[in-house]
Image: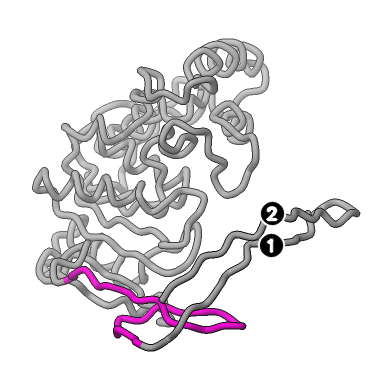
Amino acid sequence: MSQGAPTVGGDNESLAPKAVIDWLCGRIPGYTSPDGNEEVEAYWSTGKVGMTGTSYNGTLPLAAATTGVEGLEAIIPIAPNTSYYHYYRSNGLIRHPGGYLGEDIDVLYDFIHSGDESKRAYHNATVRDKEMAEGMDRITGDYNKFWASRDYLNDMKPMKAALLMSHGFNDWNVMPEHSYRIYEAARAKGIPAHIYYHQGGHGGPPPLSMMNRWFTHYLHGIDNGVEEGPRAWIVREGDDKDHPTPYEDYPNPDAAPVQLNLEAGAPGRGSLSAQQASGQGTETLVDNFSFFRIGTLTKAEFHQPPADISHA
C-alpha cells in the first residue's frame, strides 16, 4: 500500500522510517488511512525507539539513524547493505552479489517494488528507466554522484544511535566489508558500537540475549553494563552462533602476522604450516583441469599447456 517509489538507497528511504519515528515520538500526526483525516496516536510509545532487521531490512535502521532523528536510540543491523556501489561494483568491475549473474540496481528495484500498482508506470519511468539507467554506469564502473548518494558512509555525520552490527564472514551476497566500514566510522565518532561476526552466510542475528541487553539498556535505561568490556564478538570455527568469543575490538588488537610455509603432499594435496619444514624435496603441479557446466548436457573440457609450479 506504499504510495512512494523504491529508490534503492535514495534519501526517501531514509526519510520514510524517520517519519515513523517522528510519529512514534509524538512530533507529527499519523492517520488510520492514506486518504482519511482520522488521526491515530502512538500512545504506547515511550519515545525511545529501536530498530533491527536483516539484509534490506537491516539497511533501513542504518538509513534512519543517518538522519539523526531524535528518539532512535539503538539499532541492530543484520547483514546490511551500506553502499550500493560496493554491492554492485568491485574495484570498478560489475560484481554479481550472491551469484545473481547480470543483476544491477534496476533489477533490485523491480524485486522490491510493492507499492501502489496504479503509480508503477510513473515510478518505473522516473526512477528505474531514468535516474538508475543514467546513473549506474555499467560502462566504466566509476564511483559517481549517483552511487555516492547511495553510500551511507557519506551520511553518518548526524548519526548518534547506538550500534550493534551483525554479519556472517561467509556472506557472498552483502560482503562483511559493508558492516565493518560503518562500525569503524561509528567508533571513530564516539558512538557506542559493538560488532558480532559468525561463520555463516547471509543473515544471522546476534544471540537473543545480546540483543536483549542492547535494547534493554538503550530503550529502558537499565544499567546492565552493555557498554563495558569487549566490543567485538566472534563466533570461532566450529562454535555455536550463540557462543561467540569476546575480543577487545575488531580487528583483534592482539593479532600479529603469521608466516605460513608450504608443506609437501603429493600425489594428494599439500598444506600450510606455521612451522618451517626442511628436506621436503621438489614437487610439481600440472594445471590441467576438466569440469561439468551445471545446467548443460555436455561436458566442457579445457586443456591448458602444463604449467609447472615447484617449491623446495
The quadrant of the image that shows the N terminus is top right
Residue displayed at 32% across by 41% down = 62
Q: Secondary structure at mark 2?
A: loop
Residue displayed at 41% across by 62% down = 169
Q: Label 1: which residue?
A: 288
Q: Label 2: which residue?
A: 304
Q: Are marks 2 and 1 in contact (CB under 8 Å)?
A: yes
Q: Name the kind of residue labelled 2 in the image.
A: Gln
77 w.r.t. 117: above or below:
below
From mark 2 to mark 1, how far is it between C-alphas? 6 Å
The x and y percentages for residue 116 are 62, 23
User: 110 or 263, which is in the foreground?
Assistant: 263
Q: How is the image coloured?
A: one colour
61 w.r.t. 144: above or below:
below
Q: Does 210 sit left or right of 159 as displayed? A: right
What range of the chain is rendered magenta?
255-278
Q: Does 25 sit left or right of 52 as displayed? A: left
Is residue 39 rendered magenta in the image? no
The quadrant of the image that shows the C terminus is bottom left
Q: Name the kind of residue labelled 1 in the image.
A: Asn
Q: Does 185 sit left or right of 109 as displayed? A: left
Can residue 142 be seen here? The reply is: yes
Q: Secondary structure at mark 1?
A: loop
55 w.r.t. 69: above or below:
below
The x and y percentages for residue 180 are 29, 51
The x and y percentages for residue 168 are 42, 61
